[in-house]
Image (cartoon, grey):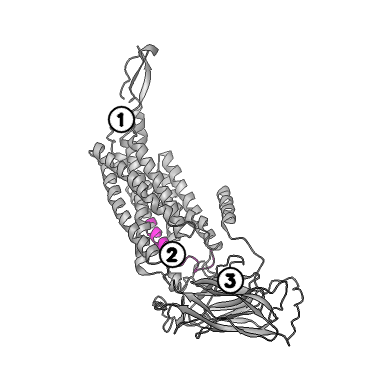
Amino acid sequence: MGGTGEVARPHTITLASRSHFLNGLAMPYNRGLHRFATFTAGATFCLLIAGALVTSNDAGLSVPDWPTSFGSIYKIPHMVGGVRFEHTHRMIAEFVGLLTIILAVWTWRVEKRRWMKALAVGALGTVVAQGVLGGLTVLFYLPPAISSAHAALAQTFFCIAVVIALFTGRRWVEEVPEVELDTRRPSLITLTLLSIFVLYVQLIMGAMFRHHGMSWWPHVVNAPVVALVLTWTAVRALAVYSKIEAVRRPAILLLGLLITQLCLGFVAFLTRVAWGRDAVQPELPMVLSTVAHVAVGALLLATAVVLAIQVWRHVPVAFAERVPDGEGSPVAA
Amino acid sequence: MTLLCLGLLILAGCSKKEEQPAAAPEAAAPAAPAATPIDPATVASVSGTVKLDGAAPKAAKIDMSQDAACKGTNNAETIVADGGNLANVFVYVKDGLGTRTFDVPTASVTIDQQGCKYHPHVLGVMAGQNIDIKNDDQTTHNIHPTPQSNREWNESQPPNAAPIQKSFAREEIMLPVKCNQHPWMRMYINVVKSPFYAVTGPDGKYTITGLPPGTYTIAFVQEKLGEQTQQVTLAAKDSKTVDQSFKQQ
């Protein structure tokens, strides 16, 4: 380095502008918007459970038409058999769609952060695409690719709803982030992004299995990989940055959900693959365990996304920047 | 958004099972070639009994409580064997008929939905032959065949509705039909090109009549136990017995 006339020093000069971007000082806390966003995320979680119930009860085609239900836009059909699952799912989906439209318009009108406006519009686009996928899978008799895309996009939308609730929260808007540089390799942000990636792969493989597009074994074989990556991520976060509450809480939740999810996955495997292979109808233990597995999987993915965002905010990566000799030390803002 | 919809449609097109020629009876079908004549004075028959080796599994009782209109009791029909006699086995001439063609019967066959159960559980029909699907229950069913080589469809049928009339254009064995409103409801339609088929009754017996003399491969197909075949040579006016047994898996 001396030979080149440069020195490597930790780079901190961008922290001020980064913090300014990440915290919401330009935007006062809007309690109504935050509560509405949180409610939308909660309704989306209910929608996920309703969708999982449709799949586990093999009720996806019990209402054979779309966008109408038995030829009607507004009439509620006789809610028996598979219809009660499918039509309930459709009604909750319409409600979540309405909530998302309101959320997008509200955000567009009151938000000063441009990226939040973009996120709200993105949420609206995602929910529209999700509705179209749901309709296509009915019209094309549940092809595995479309049904799996519907399942994966459902959890993507849930994550978007959760992060909108996060970004509109009082802590995010008013708190000055406590920042600590990450000097380890791989960095914690890399681990969190890797966690999201393996979870997403796991989600797609699980959805493909549930929708008869793939055998069960890729999902099961990938489970230890997911467990390893998530444990590594959470343990690193807790071991090094546990004093940052915004990182500690999702890391603890991630570990707890991971253990729960592994147990649920085992039970779901037993009830569906090992014992339920020749079942003549969907049995309650299978339905409960598989629906819970989907629901906790969605919570796990959303927690990993929240952890990644909080790590990005609170634990930026320290990197060495080559500063020519004689130009002095970088100045912390 | 337009691009997204276009992409989704392309994806759907890639995923969807291959479209087959329309199977609805009302669709105009090409004129069938004239049936190959069979001398009625020489026809032979084959009959027999299909057995199950090993103890029959206890039929699972189906819980129909999710729809109060589903009356009565209902047991799984995956393997129905009484005293070792195996019911619901589809028996047909798989090979040996050469290029012979046969008239499609003008009479329809009927599938009845009664007690939230299909009657019969296994059905044989010729390609192009009409099937009348009735609903005798006071609840809505949906009829959803999931074929491999015919066109898939899914239609609901409310109580007291007129029968749905359908046919299948291509040969297909053990084509599953299900009701997504009552997920235990399942039956199988066997679509064949010749009239030489039968389904074993509760006594495990079957009879196929009217066969021209020749050497044939007789196939026995059970929904869970799979397919087994036997060869038989029939002389004029022969009446042979071909029994078959399936091993319990």
Which amino acid, mark 2? Val
How far apart are the alpha carbons under marks 2 and 1? Answer: 47 Å
**Circle 3: element type:** strand
- Please tell me the numbered disc located at residue A183: 1
Q: Chain of mark 3?
A: B
Residue toward you, A85 or A166: A85
- What is the spatial separation of the Cα atoms under label 3 and label 2, in whole angstroms? 29 Å
Residue reaching furthest to the left: A243
Mark 3 Cα-neighbour bin, 10 Å: few <14, some 14–19, many ≥20:
some
The reply to whether callout 3 and callout 2 are in contact (CB within 8 Å) is no
Q: Which amino acid type corresponds to the residue marked 1 in the rendered image?
A: Thr
Q: Where residue B173 is drawn, which disc sits there? A: 3
Residue A209: % across, % down: 45, 57
Chain of the residue displaying label 2: A
Vertically, is B37 above or below A57?
A: below
Q: CA distance from mark 3 to mark 1?
A: 65 Å
Q: Mark 2 or mark 1: which comes first in sequence?
A: 2
Mark nearest the camera among 3 and 1 is 3
Label 2 packing within 10 angstroms: few (<14), some (14-19), many (20+)? many
Q: Helix or strand or loop: what does disc 1 sit on?
A: loop
Q: Is residue A57 magenta?
A: yes
